[in-house]
Every structure is written in structure tokens, then in C-alpha cells.
Image (tube, grey):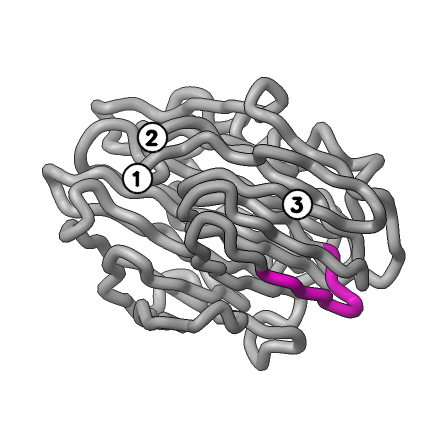
């Protein structure tokens, strides 16, 4: 499903118990310097990640000051975030003008909050220019936090250079049938550089049968409940997408690669390192 960009007025774009991705929660909060935003999401753990600007986050009696150091877009600096436990009240205070992502996954237990600073981001880069798959992934809540987070995985994905494919070889994670595949709902929010660029999100629910394609633009949100889902960007443009994964029975993601294209796993440099970082 494609949700076209709109002024959400700081209300959730993907709310609790969404019809397609009930394991996910997503909000974009836009604040001017000095403004505050309070939220509390029962039954969902969340992560506050400034897309631009700097914020202070207060939750469960702790204050995490000066989170985020980016300027005008997501290419200007490295990500930072704050983990907010399920059901905990949270206040975001804008230190500068900011656009802030709030990512969430369904999880009932209340853990402890913590900050993820720039130096703690888990980076993986894979693919190649020759295969048109060169990309960089910045894990904010990745494998390093399995002992501190319930079911939520949060990452930023960048195409490296202009043009190319992401999410290929095509994979899905729609059904809990471990060890072959885990059930993880997924939500994306896309950005393009320059911001008038665009791309294509494919969704093929059955191997070798026609699926759907969505024209994605700067600010598009995609929710994925099932199916194989590669995406691409127009030549001459760079693409970014903020990624939220929420697991049903476990936090580790087990991707099932589309049989038709599975041999491509052996042609793309570093692909298995990428897979390992989502576990």
C-alpha cells in the first residue's frame, strides 16, 4: 500500500492496529525550535529519530539531550535516536526546527529507555555499481540491541551514487515458518536527492505472477504486509528510505528470498553481511 505525502499535522501515519501492518507504528513530527510534542503509545515500543534538526527526548524520568545533528536533509549528517519503552510517556522538545520520525513495533513488555549516538550506529555497505545494487544501511536499532529491545528494528537505507536497485534479490517476510521465514511487518518512508526525484516500489505477492507497482516520491510511505518488494530510483537521483520492522514472534528478521532470483545472492558483493545485520 502506498500512502502519498500529506500534512499529517503530527498525527500517526501508520497508527496502532493498522489494517495491513498491525505490528508497526509510524509518525512524522514537525516542530519549530522551542516547540514540544508529547506522545504515549500503549502496547508499542518506539524509537525517536530526527530526520533533520536536533531534539531533546524525555521519557521515564530520563532526559536525552541534543539528539540528532543533521541539517536540511537526511544526507547531511548521521542518524541518532532514542528508544522509548512500550506505554511510556515521551516528550520531544525541538532544539532547532526539526522533522522527527517516530517508529514503533507492537510489544507489551516495558523495558528501559536509552539513546543511540552517532558513534554507535551499525553500518553495512554492500552491492556494487556494476550490479546496480550499491547501497549503505545505517542500523539505529539493529542486531547490537537484541538484549535491550523487544521486537523493533529501525534502519536507514541509502542508494550509493545515482540510480540503482534496493531490496534485491527480492525477498519476503510474511509468514512465521521458522527457520525458513519470519513474520515481520514493514513500513518505509522515502526521500530523494534532489527532492523532485522519484522511484518505483514493486510488490509481487506470488513468485512469477504479476504484482503491483507504486510511483514513490519524496515523502511517500509504503506499508508492506506480504510479498516480494524490491524498489528502485530514477537514474541521476539518490534514494533514502527510513525502515521500520516489527516482528510477530521474534525480533530477528529471517528473509525468504524469491526462488526465481535466488541465484543473484551469489552475484552481489556483501549480500550475506547485509542479511546477517538484520538478525
Q: Is residue 176 above or below residue 170?
A: below
Q: Are marks 1 and 3 in contact (CB under 8 Å)?
A: no
- Report whether residue 196 is seen: yes
Instruction: Measure the alpha-carbon separation of dots 1 and 2.
Output: 7 Å
Instruction: List x then y, in percent, for residue 115.
Output: 69, 34
Question: Mark 3 or mark 2: which comes first in sequence?
Answer: 3
Q: Which residue is mark 3?
A: 57
Q: Quadrant of residue 82?
A: top right
**Residue 76 - label:** 2
Residue range of the region highlighted in magenta in the rendering? 37-45
Residue nearest the observer in this picture, 256 or 17: 17
Q: Which residue is mark 1?
A: 72
Q: Quadrant of residue 201?
A: bottom left
Instruction: List x then y, in percent, for residue 41.
Output: 72, 67
> How packed is label 2: few (under 14 Cα within 10 Å), some, or many (20 or more)?
few
Side of 270 where 234 appears, left or right: left
Residue sitting at x 43%, y 40%: 53
Circle 3 SS class: strand
Instruction: Measure the alpha-carbon separation of dots 1 and 3.
Output: 20 Å
Residue sitting at x 44%, y 72%: 9
Instruction: List x then y, in percent, for residue 155.
Output: 53, 40
Amino acid at each position: 500500500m502506498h500512502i502519498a505525502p500529506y500534512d499529517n499535522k503530527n498525527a500517526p501515519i501508520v497508527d496502532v492496529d493498522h489494517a495491513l501492518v498491525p505490528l508497526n507504528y509510524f509518525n512524522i513530527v514537525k516542530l519549530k525550535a522551542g516547540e514540544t510534542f508529547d506522545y504515549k503509545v500503549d502496547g508499542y515500543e518506539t524509537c525517536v529519530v530526527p530526520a533533520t534538526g536536533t531534539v531533546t527526548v524525555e521519557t521515564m524520568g530520563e532526559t536525552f539531550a541534543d539528539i540528532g545533528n543533521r541539517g536540511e536533509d537526511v544526507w547531511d549528517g548521521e542518524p541518532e535516536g532514542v528508544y522509548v519503552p512500550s506505554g511510556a510517556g515521551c516528550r520531544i522538545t525541538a532544539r532547532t526546527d526539526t522533522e522527527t520520525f517516530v517508529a514503533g513495533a507492537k510489544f507489551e513488555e516495558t523495558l528501559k529507555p536509552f539513546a543511540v549516538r552517532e558513534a554507535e550506529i551499525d553500518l553495512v555497505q554492500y552491492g556494487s555499481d556494476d550490479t546496480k545494487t550499491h547501497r549503505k544501511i545505517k542500523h539505529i536499532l539493529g542486531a547490537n540491541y537484541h538484549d535491550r529491545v523487544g521486537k523493533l528494528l529501525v534502519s536507514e537505507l541509502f542508494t550509493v551514487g545515482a540510480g540503482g536497485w534496493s531490496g534485491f534479490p527480492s525477498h519476503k517476510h510474511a509468514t512465521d515458518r521458522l527457520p525458513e521465514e519470519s513474520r515481520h511487518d514493514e513500513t518505509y518512508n522515502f526521500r530523494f536527492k534532489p527532492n523532485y526525484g522519484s522511484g518505483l516500489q514493486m510488490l509481487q505477492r506470488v513468485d512469477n505472477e504479476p504484482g503491483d507497482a507504486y510511483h514513490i516520491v519524496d515523502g511517500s510511505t509504503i506499508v508492506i504486509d506480504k510479498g516480494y518488494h524490491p524498489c528502485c530510483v530514477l537514474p541521476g537521483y539518490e534514494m533514502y528510505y527510513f525502515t521500520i520492522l516489527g516482528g510477530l514472534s521474534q525480533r530477528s528478521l529471517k528473509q525468504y528470498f524469491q526462488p526465481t532470483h535466488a541465484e543473484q545472492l551469489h552475484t552481489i558483493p556483501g549480500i550475506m553481511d547485509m542479511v546477517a545485520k538484520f538478525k
